Image (cartoon, rainbow, N blue to C red):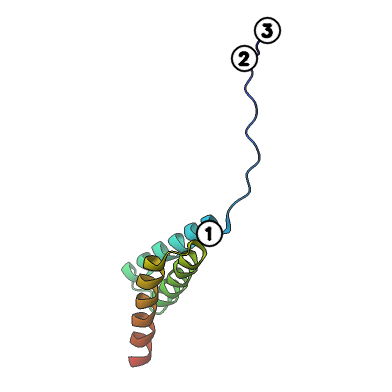
Amino acid sequence: MPSDAQALPKATTLNPAFVLKWAASIVQILGYSATAWGLHPWNIYLFLAGLTGWFLVGVLWNDRAIMLIHLVALGAMISGIWSS
């Protein structure tokens, strides 16, 4: 007689890229919030951390488009910091 009970799902391990992309996204959202609240230079630091995280996600995924856009954004942020 077949059982109606379902098997429990297997325990899954968290992929480092999954954790990093969500952490970097949250940090970037905090950077946007810090900008809206006028929390300078914290907004810049948060953006730099978020952009670095997303660049590393691109490296882990071997996604050159993600690496390129975040490397360009990092360069723009760093040049803006140095010029001010």
Residue at horizontal 39 percent and vertical 66 percent from the top:
66
Q: SS class of the residue under badge 3?
A: loop
Q: Position of residue 29 (x, y in %)?
A: 39, 62
Tell me the residue that label 1 is attached to: 17
Task: Compare marks 2 and 1 and give the one earlier in the sequence.
Answer: 2
* Residue type, numbered disc 3: Met
Residue 19 in the image, given as x and y percentages of width and height = 54, 57
Q: How many labels sit on residues?
A: 3
At x 39%, y 78%, the residue is 74
Percent across and percent down for residue 9 are: 62, 33
Marker disc for residue 1: 3
The correct choice, above or below, for 17 with respect to 72 in the image is: above
Q: Secondary structure at mark 1?
A: helix
Report if the CB atoms under discs 2 and 1 are less than 8 Å apart. Answer: no
Q: Which mark is residue 68?
A: none
Q: Counting residues from the N terminus, which is met first, the one under dot 1 or under dot 3?
A: 3
Frontmost residue, 59 versus 34 = 59
Q: CA distance from mark 1 to mark 3?
A: 43 Å
**Closer to the camera, 43 or 67?**
67
Q: Nearer the viewer, mark 2 or mark 3?
A: 3
Kind of residue at badge 2: Asp
On residue 4, which mark appears? Answer: 2
The secondary structure type at the circle numbered 2 is: loop
Q: Residue at x 33, y 85 (%)?
A: 80
Crowding around mark 2 (Cα neighbors within 10 Å: few <14, some 14 to 19, many 20+) is: few
Name the kind of residue labelled 1 in the image: Ala
Front tag of 1 and 3? 3
* Alpha-carbon span between mark 2 and mark 1: 36 Å
Above or below, comparing residue 11 to residue 71 in the picture: above
